[in-house]
Amino acid sequence: MGNGIAHTFAQHGFGVSLVDINTEALNKAIQTITNNLDRQLKKGLIDDQVKATTLSRIKTFTDLQQGAAHADLVIEAATENREIKLKLFKQLSDIGSDQVILASNTSSISITQIAAVTKNPGNVIGMHFMNPVPVMKLVEVIRGYATTDAVTNTIMELAKTLDKDPVEVNDYPGFVANRILMPMINEAIYTLYEGVAGVAEIDTVMKLGMAHPMGPLQLADFIGLDVCVAILKVLYDGFGNQKYAPCPLLVNMVTAGHSGVKTGSGFYKYTPGSKELIVADKFVSR
């Protein structure tokens, strides 16, 4: 998500500092951005000059202080882990000016809770992009309890300059997108777990019957099964309702290291460079 956000801002004229503690991760991010720009180039959406200018606007840093000290806006896109995010926002609050806006790309964790560890909670907001960021139009803008009108309006207008469609929502577990999406994905996994139908059959029903561009099991792989578990736990903790408890099959898959596209295996198998969708061996009828 971080490389997609950096790509989008840079392509729309903003100077971007891309920060990660790992140089290898930064190199991979730049390569991903380059590959995505090449795809845009092949489709005729951009020209060579736009590609070169976009890449020139992105600087990489492994030091948070160097990367964020002079930023007007910081967008955090770390893993969906509350403790990591709270630690980051406390650091960012100490590093930045009193005017800097601190945004989180979290898909479920409370903006109010994140804001509470900062010096200026009114300047903290959620800016939940959809993946792949350069393509998807929605930005879910989440107001924390203390987020000011001025900051909200700034982020709403900023999203429009990125050619996105911002939607303002309030700070409750899962916000809107994942409060609706994750129970659907979880129910699809339960449908598989209980033997109602196979992986391809479940996804086909949702694609052909409900006009979804991607079936829920393939989408879960794309999101990351570990991320799905994390979001469902936030929903379960926040609402205390059993319907949000992650399916045992999902938990077992993540525990076994099968988290979807990023690990090469989830409900489907993934081979670099291949576009063929193959159901993982675990779910093939014998």
Image (cartoon, rainbow, N blue to C red):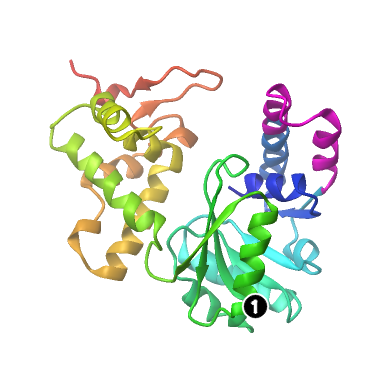
**At 34% from the left edge and 39% from the top edge, which residue is drawn?**
256
Q: Nearer the viewer, residue 39 or 106?
A: 39
Residue 235 makes an appearance in the image:
yes
Which residues are the magenta region? 36-57
The amino acid sitting under disc 1 is Ala
Could you say which quadrant of the image residue 159 lies in?
A: bottom right
Q: Secondary structure at mark 1?
A: helix
**At 65% from the left edge and 56% from the top edge, which residue is drawn?**
160
**At 81% from the left edge and 29% from the top edge, which residue is drawn?**
47
Up/down of 66 relative to 275, above or below: below
Residue 90 makes an appearance in the image:
no
Q: Would residue 223 appear left or right of 103 to someone viewing this image?
A: left
Q: Which residue is mark 1?
A: 150
Up/down of 264 relative to 284, above or below: below
Up/down of 127 relative to 13, above or below: below
- Residue 66 position in % (x across, y down): 80, 63
Image quadrant holding the C terminus, namely top left
Predominant secondary structure in magenta? helix
- Residue 175 position in % (x across, y down): 41, 63
